[in-house]
Structure formats: structure tokens, C-alpha cells
Amino acid sequence: MDYAQARAQVDAQHPAPRVLAVADDPELRQQLREALTGFEVIEAEEGDQALAAVKEELPDLVLTPLVLPGMDGVALMEQLRAYQPKLPVVVLVGEGEAEAVADKGFGGVADQPVEAAALRGAVGGLLEREGLA
């Protein structure tokens, strides 16, 4: 089964957009889950788990902090794009980090600490632009 067929099967089984939330901090993952009401949230603690989850779960979007142990958000996004070039990736940045990722190819940037309404808007807006919502 190719990616398009697998994607269609997942979409039929899961009507809500699926977001893979990557974060090594359990508190941040909980904040992301709570902020993303209305979305189906899949979780991964680090980059390698995220790569496996993308292949197994076929999320509509990946949400990752810039800083992760073992693999930063930029490296994760590059590996995700090698597997699925059109997969939208939103990066969470702390104060002063937005400029560092401006030209890295992320689909969106969201502030950390997480502000629920802003995050839902960024994720929902990107999914709409990509025709996935």
C-alpha cells in the first residue's frame, strides 16, 4: 500500500485531524493535548519515536519544540520531509528563537510557553492551507 492509499484509509477511520505532538517533557505534552481540543493527538517523547509514529500513525501535522534531546526540531523536520515532503511541521520556539528558524522550512511557528488559542489557530490555519482540515 502506498502513502496515498494508507493516508485515505487513516482519514476514513479518524475524522478529526491528527497531530503528532513531540516533546520530551511530559508536562509540555499534557499542555499540547489540552490546547489541541478538537484534534486527535498522538504523542512521542523524542525524535526517533516521532519518525516511527509518522510512519505508523500517518498524522496530518507534526508539532515539535526546537530543542529536543538527541535530535533538534530542525533535524527532525528534515528527516520527516525526506519521508513525506508535504507533511506540515510546526515548531515551538522560546523567546528569541523564532528568527533562528525563519528560513528552515517549517510550516508554522508557535510560541512556547503554549497559549492554547494561539496554538489551535496556528495548527488549524496550517491544516486549512494544506487542505487537511
Image: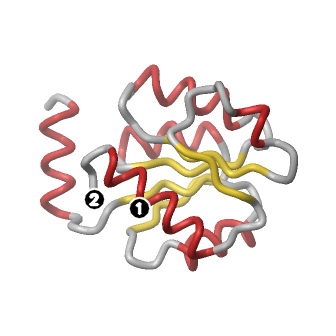
Q: Residues within 10 Å of mark 2 (few under 14, many from 20)?
A: some
Location of the C terminus (image quadrant): bottom left
Q: Is residue 23 left or right of residue 126?
A: right
Residue drawn at the location 54% of the way across and 25% of the way down: 79
Q: Is residue 18 left or right of residue 89?
A: left
Q: Position of residue 30 (x, y in %)?
A: 65, 74
Can you identify the residue that label 1 sits on? 124
Answer whether labels 1 and 2 touch (C-beta < 8 Å). yes
Residue drawn at the location 57% of the way across and 44% of the way down: 49
Q: Is residue 7 left or right of residue 60?
A: left
Quarter where residue 40 is shown? bottom left
Q: Position of residue 90 (x, y in %)?
A: 56, 47
Q: CA distance from mark 1 to mark 2?
A: 7 Å
**Please, which residue is most extreme toward the top here?**
82
**Vertical arrangement, residue 43 with respect to residue 63, above or below:** below
Q: How are the colours assigned in the image?
A: secondary structure
Residue drawn at the location 59% of the way across and 68% of the way down: 118
Q: Position of residue 74 (x, y in %)?
A: 67, 30
**Vertical arrangement, residue 73 with respect to residue 116, above or below:** above
Can you identify the residue that label 2 sits on? 133
**Vertical arrangement, residue 7 with respect to residue 74, above or below:** below
Q: Sequence-wise, which precedes: disc 1 or disc 2?
A: 1
Location of the N terminus (image quadrant): top left
Amino acid type shown at disc 1:
Gly
Residue drawn at the location 32% of the way across and 54% of the way down: 128
Q: In the image, which disc is placed on residue 48?
A: none
**Please, which residue is most extreme toward the right here?**
96
Q: Position of residue 123 (x, y in %)?
A: 47, 58
Quarter where residue 68 is shown? top right
What is the secondary structure assignment of the residue under circle 2?
loop
Amino acid type shown at disc 2:
Ala
